[in-house]
Image (cartoon, rainbow, N blue to C red):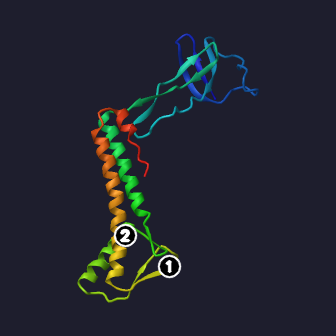
Amino acid sequence: MFTVYDTNAEKGVAHGMPWPTADGSSAPPGLEEGLVLLEELEDPTPDHDPITQEVVDLGWSYDVQAGTAVRPKHVIDLSLDLAKQRKNDAIDERTRQMISEGFDHDNRHFSLSAQAQMNLDGVQMAAEKSIINFPHKMSTDDDGIEYELADQGALDVVYGKAVGKIKQCMDGGRDLKNAVMAATTVEDVRAVADER
């Protein structure tokens, strides 16, 4: 692709054009005086932290002698408040993801999706009110295999593991978010690493 550059006005007048000659490099005959063709170069996106930084396009830059046009990209830090908000949003998303991964018990995997949590809460409340009878079967993530709860004690163990997994994820997220809120610079926010 190429840019048509007006050397008299010192500006690009057309961008993203296919090269007009078959060899892909020579200037076409009859090109209006003062116009030159510049090869458009791709400026790679610089390394950056997408949570606390943003890449901005600095507009076209022309080098007539080299015969090139490029749109350089530059990395800027977000405001401290926005960086904190984005970092906390990312921590919340990771916390939800970790909870949704569920937990293992007795060689079975149990979901902790929002629906699974509601179902487990419902079973626990029903058991406390003696509405359900034991043994009681509940779903697992293991290809439709059901898990049998022999008694209230077995339910308490499963429920305790579910609550423990959720609490562990929430506590870890809370600690990270407290570190983010205590940050006084964007660099401090960036340094808070969620390695859970």
Q: Which mark is residue 161?
A: 2
Q: Position of residue 111 (x, y in %)?
A: 42, 69
Q: Is residue 109 left or right of residue 40?
A: left
Q: Is residue 142 left or right of residue 87?
A: right
C-alpha distance separating marks 2 and 1: 21 Å
Residue situated in front as seen by the camera: 196 or 99: 196
What residue is rendered at 34% in x and 63% in y? 166
Check disc 1 and give the amino acid type. Answer: Gly
> In the orientation shown, which residue stands out farthest toward the right?
23
Q: Which mark is first along the chain, 1 or 2? A: 1
> Judging from the image, what secondary structure is the residue with disc 2 in?
helix
> Judging from the image, what secondary structure is the residue with disc 1 in?
loop
Proximity of marks 2 and 1: CB atoms separated by less than 8 Å: no
Q: Position of residue 171 (x, y in %)?
A: 32, 55
Q: Which mark is residue 144?
A: 1
Q: Residues within 10 Å of mark 1 (few under 14, many from 20)?
A: few
Q: Position of residue 187 (x, y in %)?
A: 37, 33
Q: Is residue 162 left or right of residue 24?
A: left
Q: Nearer the viewer, mark 2 or mark 1?
A: 2
Q: Residues within 10 Å of mark 2 (few under 14, many from 20)?
A: some
Check disc 2 and give the amino acid type. Answer: Lys
Q: Quadrant of residue 64?
A: top right
Q: Quadrant of residue 52?
A: top left
Q: Is residue 119 visible?
A: no
Q: Is residue 173 left or right of residue 46?
A: left
What residue is rendered at 51% in x and 34% in y? 47
Q: Position of residue 12 (x, y in %)?
A: 54, 20
Residue situated in front as seen by the camera: 173 or 55: 173
